[in-house]
Amino acid sequence: MNSHKNKFQILSLGAILGVVITASLVSSSAFADSGGKYNGQRFANMTSYANQQSAGISYHANQQSAGISYHANQQSQSTTSHTDQKFAYTVYHANHQSQSITSHTDQKFAYVPWHADQKIANIVSHIDQKIVDRTVSVDHRIQDVMSHTDQKFVDNTLRTDQKIVNIATHVDQQPVDRSVTVQYSPSTTYVSYGTSPTPSTPTVPTPVPIHNDKIPNWVKDVFAFYLAGKLSDHDLIHTIQYLVSQGIINA
């Protein structure tokens, strides 16, 4: 728009200059007869001045037009350069952002499988360790139970064997024949020791005292061992004789 305005101003200035020159020529013609050589010289001067002014105006107009064109070209080039730079920067930014997103996505994708594998590895390791710990605990518990059972069995066997030995020893230490037989008749009472009866003065029979009201547990064990086949007939007979001698049972 500025270019068209400048051209319009130049054309207007040229038209005014033409009017001035025409008026000068008319004035020169009017005074030609009376002015003579003076008028011709004046006309020549005015023509030279008008030509110089017209040339100056034309030169100025050309200079201004050239400056406007140069400025327009410079502005156009600057705008084009700025547009190209902005477009290039936008493309670069878009490419860089795309690369960053792709790199981040790839890293995130790589991290997720790695994290999943690591988590699975930890879970598997924990399960394996738990199985190992549980197996060790179970095995140790089984060993403890077996050891306790074996020890208990050994202790019971030792106690049982020791008890049997003590009973057998105790029975063996008693007299072989301490049985007492009392025979009653109207006039005579015979008391026999072993197998030889001896007459005595008639007396009132006295019952054999019983010192205990119940059978001891070890006696019960003797009969249990005999039924189980762990005692011989000889050991059982000695035991019964001992019970009779102590008044626990009557013969």
Image (tube, helix red, strand yellow):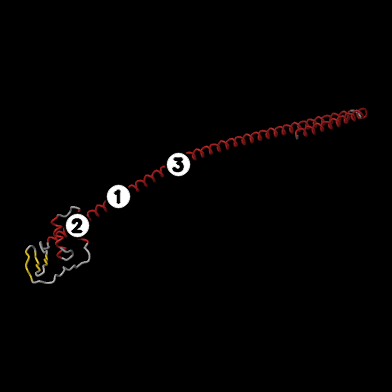
* Amino acid bearing label 1: Ile
* Amino acid bearing label 2: Phe
Q: Secondary structure at mark 1?
A: helix
Q: Secondary structure at mark 2?
A: helix
Measuring from the top left, give residue 76's x and y in whole percent. Answer: 68, 33
Q: What residue did someone put label 1 on?
A: 142
Q: CA distance from mark 3 to mark 2?
A: 74 Å
Neighbourhood count class around disc 2 (C-alpha, 10 Å): few under 14, some 14–19, many 20 upward: some
Q: Please give the name of the residue rendered at 46% of the width and 39% of the height, measured from the top-left corner.
A: 113
Q: Which of the image's four quarters has the C terminus?
A: bottom left
Measuring from the top left, give residue 16's x and y in whole percent. Answer: 84, 32
Neighbourhood count class around disc 1 (C-alpha, 10 Å): few under 14, some 14–19, many 20 upward: few
100 over 140 or under it: above or below: above
Q: Secondary structure at mark 3?
A: helix
Horizontal arrangement in the rendering, residue 110 relative to residue 222 (left or right): right
Q: Please give the name of the residue rendered at 10% of the width and 71% of the height, measured from the top-left corner.
A: 202
Residue 223 - label: 2
Q: Nearer the viewer, residue 122 or 213?
A: 213
Of the two numbered discs 1 and 2 in the rendering, the one whose residue sits closer to the viewer: 2
Measuring from the top left, give residue 62's x and y in whole percent. Answer: 75, 31
Residue 116 - label: 3
Rendering quarter of residue 197: bottom left
Horizontal arrangement in the rendering, residue 191 relative to residue 95 (left or right): left
Q: Residue furthest right?
A: 34
* Amino acid bearing label 3: Ala
Label 3 vs 2, first from the N-terminus? 3
